[in-house]
């Protein structure tokens, strides 16, 4: 491992890419502490401490804590992610976007440009909502107002600052993807989540030092943490390989095809999106309850949808399984795969090309998605279970599973694989000489 780390800095291009990525991420973290003018940051932080597990907490997670501090990067990269998802969904509905998706590099550039425009529009709308939200926060327990001088001046200034911040973050992400190492947008989310980990560990140490938790229980919790991370890595890397044979074709004096390859079907094709969709929907009842603070019925509904209730766990898990199938159906189209294989003379041994091939791929994808979706649901529920049974702080328990762990593991593996490919291209040993990191585990 140490030899591989030393090899990284022996390759000028790889060294330059890693240092450039690190510099951009440092600038991003510094910008996450530049406050928006006209906001009482201390009063806002006091408010968030009582509402950190709701929809605002999820938003703050993707913003790396910048939302709870009301900085210029408060919107984070969420508007860009939302615009990307909308454009992707349009590709499954509107023929114009389907055509762009099939036009190769030119179509990709056009879709990227449309995503940028969508990001600006969503940022303006969300920034307006944030400014109204900040003005309506009631006086905190310490008697402070979050926005001492509300009005249209504050609204316009906030919209300008937050939209500009999102555009800068989007630019940072594209710079990292183009000139750095790894996926820029994913790394920005990754660094925001990881930045919370040291404080969470410190809080856990304080619990042990204060005698609130024994060393044995703490050791069991860390053992569970390691097992959960290992299981998440297996889920992220797991694939089912379908063998594909290409027939030989003679074009002029040249012979094309004849090679054997495979189609890698991922166990978790949907990634972290099912958890995000399920959380967004389950936060709706909690948001509605805030408008009816004196209603006993609404308070009962709020108790049912509490993140530590059994009812919440069952509904949450069922929705994750549903959205895993839903997003997989959007992200992977067996009919297109079968048509492309038939077009270039490819076939699955023992399966007729065309409709039979698409049905065969769809059948296998459906079967491997079921255990993947169930395991994804278990990982998503683990933080709530750990918080309730072991009395662990939610900030630390969030690293046991859910959105945080899946993003951290997925981005870390993707970045590590890119570094590995650079090392192997220049005839250096990779991080794992057995080569397991270069491919995905086969099921």
Image (cartoon, grey):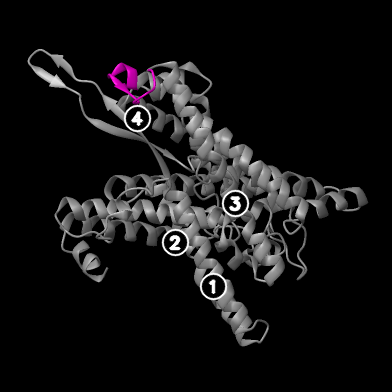
- Asked where in the image residue 127 lies, by quadrant, the reply is top right
Sequence-wise, which precedes: disc 1 or disc 3?
Answer: 3
Separation (CA) of disc 1 from disc 3: 27 Å
List x then y, in percent, for residue 199: 54, 72
Residue that badge 4 annotates = 109
Q: Residue at x 77, y 57 (%)?
A: 309
List x then y, in percent, for residue 10: 16, 63
Separation (CA) of disc 3 from disc 4: 28 Å
Report helix, strand or loop for mark 3.
Answer: helix
Towards the viewer: 383 or 82? 383
Kindly report which numbered mark, 2 or 4, lies closer to the viewer in this rendering.
Answer: 4
Residue that badge 1 annotates = 222
Towards the viewer: 380 or 142? 380
With respect to residue 389, does 252 lie above or below?
Answer: above
Kindly report which numbered mark, 1 or 4, lies closer to the viewer in this rendering.
Answer: 1
Separation (CA) of disc 1 from disc 4: 45 Å
Residue that badge 3 annotates = 59
Kindly report which numbered mark, 1 or 3, lies closer to the viewer in this rendering.
Answer: 1
- Looking at the rendered structure, the number of numbered marks drawn on it comes to 4
């Amino acid at each position: 491992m140490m030899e591989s780390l030393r090899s990284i800095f022996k390759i000028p291009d790889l060294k330059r890419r890693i240092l450039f990525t690190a510099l951009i991420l440092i600038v991003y973290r510094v910008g996450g502490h530049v406050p928006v003018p006209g906001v009482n940051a201390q009063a806002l932080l006091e408010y968030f401490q009582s509402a950190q597990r709701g929809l605002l907490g999820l938003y703050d997670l993707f913003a790396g804590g910048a939302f709870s501090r009301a900085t210029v990067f408060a919107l984070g990269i969420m508007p860009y992610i939302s615009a990307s998802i909308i454009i992707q969904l349009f590709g499954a509905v509107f023929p114009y976007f389907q055509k762009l998706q099939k036009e190769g590099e030119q179509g990709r550039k056009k879709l990227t440009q449309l995503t940028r425009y969508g990001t600006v529009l969503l940022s303006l709308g969300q920034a307006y909502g944030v400014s109204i939200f900040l003005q309506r926060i009631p006086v905190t327990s310490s008697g402070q107002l979050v926005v001492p001088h509300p009005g249209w001046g504050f609204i316009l200034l906030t919209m300008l600052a937050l939209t500009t911040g999102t555009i800068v973050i989007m630019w940072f992400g594209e710079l990292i993807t183009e000139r750095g190492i790894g996926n820029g947008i994913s790394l920005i989310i990754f660094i925001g989540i990881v930045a919370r980990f040291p404080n969470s560990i410190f809080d856990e140490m304080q619990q042990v030092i204060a005698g609130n938790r024994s060393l044995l229980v703490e050791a069991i919790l860390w053992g569970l943490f390691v097992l959960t991370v290992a299981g998440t890595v297996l889920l992220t890397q797991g694939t089912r390989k379908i063998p594909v044979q290409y027939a030989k074709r003679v074009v002029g004096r040249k012979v094309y095809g004849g090679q054997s390859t495979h189609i890698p079907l991922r166990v978790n094709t949907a990634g972290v999106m099912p958890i995000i969709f399920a959380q967004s929907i389950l936060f709706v009842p909690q948001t509605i309850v805030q408008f009816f603070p004196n209603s006993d019925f609404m308070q009962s509904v709020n108790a049912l949808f509490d993140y530590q209730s059994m009812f919440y766990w069952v509904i949450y898990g069922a929705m994750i399984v549903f959205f895993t199938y839903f997003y997989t159906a959007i992200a992977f189209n067996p009919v297109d795969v079968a048509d492309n294989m038939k077009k270039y003379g490819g076939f699955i041994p023992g399966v007729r090309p065309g409709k039979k091939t698409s049905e065969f791929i769809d059948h296998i994808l459906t079967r491997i998605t079921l255990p993947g979706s169930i395991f994804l649901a278990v990982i998503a529920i683990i933080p709530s279970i750990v918080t309730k049974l072991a009395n662990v702080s939610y900030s630390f328990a969030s690293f046991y599973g859910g959105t945080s762990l899946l993003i951290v593991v997925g981005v870390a593996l993707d970045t590590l694989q890119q570094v590995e490919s650079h090392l192997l291209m220049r005839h250096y040993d990779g991080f794992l000489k057995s080569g397991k990191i270069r491919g995905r585990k086969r099921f």
